Image (cartoon, rainbow, N blue to C red):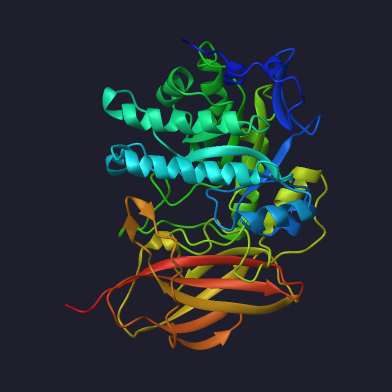
Amino acid sequence: MLLTGLSQCHNPNDQPRRRTVSIEEKNGKFILHRNGRPFEIKGAAGYSHFHTLRESGGNTLRTWDTTRLASLLDSAQANHLAVVVGLPLPMNDDMSFYNDPVKVAAHLKALQVVVNRFKHNPAVLMWSLGNELDFPFGFSYYRFYTTFNAITDMIHRDDPDHPVTTVVLNFNTKYIFNITTRCDVDLLSFNIYSNIKSLRKDLADFSWFWNGPYLLTEWGIDGPWEGTEQTAWGAYIEDTSKKKADFYLKRYQQDVPREDPRFLGSFVFFWGNKQETTPTWFSLFDEAGAHAEPVAIMKYIWTGKPSPEPFPELQYMLVNQKGARDNILLNPGSLSTAEVFLYKADNRIKTVKWQILPEDWYRENNQNSTKKLKPIEGLFQKNQNLKATFAAPDQEGPYRVFATIYLQNGNFATCNTPFYVVSDP
């Protein structure tokens, strides 16, 4: 049976009482209701910095799993935040899991325990089953769909007060078709980055088949993947935090389909600090919780009020007068000079932290590593704040030199430049 809207999977008349969270279609517009009131999601994807999120005008966190969920929900509630709770599920092609009824039953039971333990927590907004699962055609995936549906049926039965969603990568019409015809969720969610530029058109072109409500559970700057500039040896070139801040604002204003009556909200990625190719690529905070400029941009997006707090006006970095696109090659132990340039001089700079890290090329199951890298000690010979002299590492291979500039108010800006150490033949 073809469904034109996922919200139609459950008739609100089936429940005599008002649900805590529900999705209503009224005059062609979908409205998310929480505790009887319309609720527009102004969200961030992450596990931390609840107070800053609330102060910035955000109202919802999105997680990927149930790690420390009790503490997370308590912190969210204390800061008047809602949470889209991620319920982990193995990828659809993990047949060692889906072909094992014992493993499947144990996982279903574990998720049932979580749902029933936290379904009355006032911070819970909805459940999100799986992250970036594939929903392919083919009888070989029968057990995947059976498992997925058993879990969503359990959630709908045990907790009718909260909607259930699942997250797919980009706008994939094949997956949307299979979800709407083979599964039972209340709305769809998309993790989408560079493809967001065509999202409005994609939604319109496929509305003849599916015109239900949706969330953007991840959006942000383009990541270290296909389509992003690389050096000759394959290191992805990262923008400065200043350029990222400008990009967040431009992408939100131009590409997030806020005017769409099916759009229920979005979550910026990543509200915290994480390693993904570099420790700074997606991180809106440093490890100690200091703010990069995109935090102020999100406050402006959510409240309409520009932040009065200053950030370093970082322009670019050069190593030996060369930029990242110049494919910088160094000999082991050779001395080089890295220099950071600002748009204008700033006497509020408190400190500049210089570091050299090895390039993070490790992948597991085609996923980026999230393990923090350790800076290589003892390489910097001279540090003059915006300029530093360093010795290239002795071991041949790819590296990056990082500069993090802190103002006296604690806010920071960051940039890095990749280079490759080549031994003499």
Near-viewer residue (2 or 71):
71
Q: Position of residue 262 (x, y in %)?
A: 65, 23
Quarter of the image for the C terminus: give it.
bottom left
Q: Position of residue 126 (x, y in %)?
A: 64, 37
Q: Which residue does the image show at 47% across and 63% down from the upper left?
A: 278
Q: Position of residue 362 (x, y in %)?
A: 33, 61
Left/right placement of residue 332 relative to residue 168 reads left
Left/right placement of residue 231 relative to residue 307 reads left
Q: Which residue does the image show at 55% across and 51% down from the upper left?
A: 66
Q: Quadrant of residue 174?
A: top left
The answer to whether residue 352 is above or below residue 67 is below
The answer to whether residue 70 is above or below residue 208 is below
Specify whether residue 412 is in view: yes
Q: Quadrant of residue 412?
A: bottom right
The answer to whether residue 126 is above or below residue 242 is above
Left/right placement of residue 386 relative to residue 82 reads left
Specify whether residue 192 is in view: no
Q: How many marks?
A: 0
